[in-house]
Amino acid sequence: MKKAHAKRVVATAIAFLPLSLLATQSSGAASQPVNVVGYSIVANAYTALEKAFVKTGPGQGVTFTNSFGASTTQAEDVVAGQPADVVNFSQQPDLALLINAGLVSRKWATTKYSKAEKGIVTDSVVAIVVRPGNPLGIHTWNDLLNSGVKLVTPDPISSGSARWNLLAAYEAQIDQGQTAAQATTYINSLIGNVVSEPASGSKALSAFIAGTGNVLLAYESDALNAFATGQKIQVIEPQQNLLIQNPAALTTTGTANPAAKAFYAYIFSKAGQQVWLSQHFRPTIASLASVSKSTFYTPTSFNNVTKLGGWAQVTPKFFGPTGIITKAENAHGFTS
């Protein structure tokens, strides 16, 4: 019997989380608000970033409107007219939707604010999350095929997190010396153990904490934050992993908004990157590289999208209409 799969609603409910401070008497009228749109996992981080930014000189009097949700859905909403000055997505193909629509410059990654990081504001990896005490004895990617595993991972149609998760799982097999055919068989078996595909990474974590399934694939940052705030989970660090790189860009309206440009510069600054670090994201600036290395684990095999041929090759191979993961999803009843 095919597993039920909730249809994704394109017009998702968007939560606006305003952060407002009155301008000081000396600064005159409040600056133009900054509209931030991002993928679901970064919501708490932006709350912290905005609170820190408004305490700086360039942040005096700046106000924000925020919208966070499944990465691809968020990108589609911006293309459809959702106001956005600063965007932060899970993966570059989502940003490409805005570039193709003329809403973000094709030179987005070479601005003076983020040129050294090529527009990548944070890094992460995939974490395997289990119940306390690890009752199923999950330690490796291969253990996810064990009998009794009920896996939760987001929907790859709407969620960048889901694509990172499944791509990491596939490449872990290649890194262990398996053939492409064997890795494809593995992915089919893995998706066969999936019992729920929520729309976003944050919704997947919420479903898992509420009792759905017994193993979750998640952003390392999201899993570590949940553990740090007292959630009853255990985080497993697989020896094979994939570097998750999250792009941030100014839109065409953002480049015309001085407050947006100042905030964008801040999230790439050392102060801003330390805020990201406090939220368990891996910072991307060189001055914090040693801190990142001492704080986070390093997989034995560490892949990245560039090594795999870039998104131009990865997207059709895995997520196109006849892609490896698309076909596996369809075979197990997870259809669009």
Image (cartoon, rainbow, N blue to C red):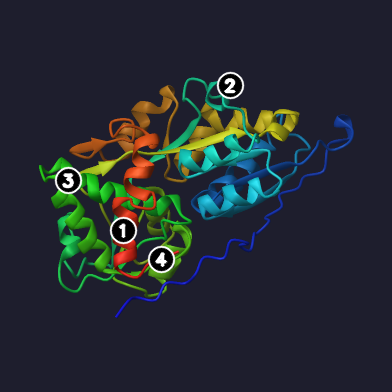
> Residue at horizontal 46%, vertical 25%?
117
Q: Nearer the viewer, residue 110 or 314?
A: 314
Instruction: Please tell me whether residue 298 is drawn above or below residue 76 in the rendered image.
Output: above
Residue 103 at x, y = what percent?
Answer: 65, 36
Type of amino acid at the residue the image marks with label 1: Lys
Nearer the observer, disc 2 or disc 1?
1
**Alpha carbon separation for disc pair 2 and 3:** 38 Å
Type of amino acid at the residue the image marks with label 4: Thr
**Alpha carbon separation for disc pair 2 and 1:** 38 Å
Mark 2 or mark 3: name the one nearer the start of the chain: 2
The mark found on residue 111 in the picture is 2
Residue 59 at x, y = what percent?
Answer: 71, 33
Mark 3 or mark 1: name the one nearer the start of the chain: 3
Nearer the observer, disc 2 or disc 3?
3
- Decide: marks 2, 1 in contact (CB < 8 A)? no
Q: Say whether residue 211 is left or right of residue 95.
A: left
Type of amino acid at the residue the image marks with label 3: Ala
Q: Nearer the viewer, residue 231 or 317?
A: 317
> Residue at horizontal 18%, vertical 57%?
186
- Decide: marks 2, 3 in contact (CB < 8 A)? no
**Alpha carbon separation for disc pair 3 and 1:** 15 Å
Mark 1 or mark 4: name the one nearer the start of the chain: 1
Q: Say whether residue 130 is left or right of residue 91.
A: left
Find the residue positioned furthest to the bottom: 1
Could one spot residue 237 in this view of the protein? no
Q: Which residue is mark 1?
A: 327
Q: Which quadrant of the rendered structure holds the N terminus? A: bottom left
Dot 1: what SS? helix
Nearer the observer, disc 2 or disc 4?
4
Q: Say whether residue 33 is left or right of residue 48.
A: right
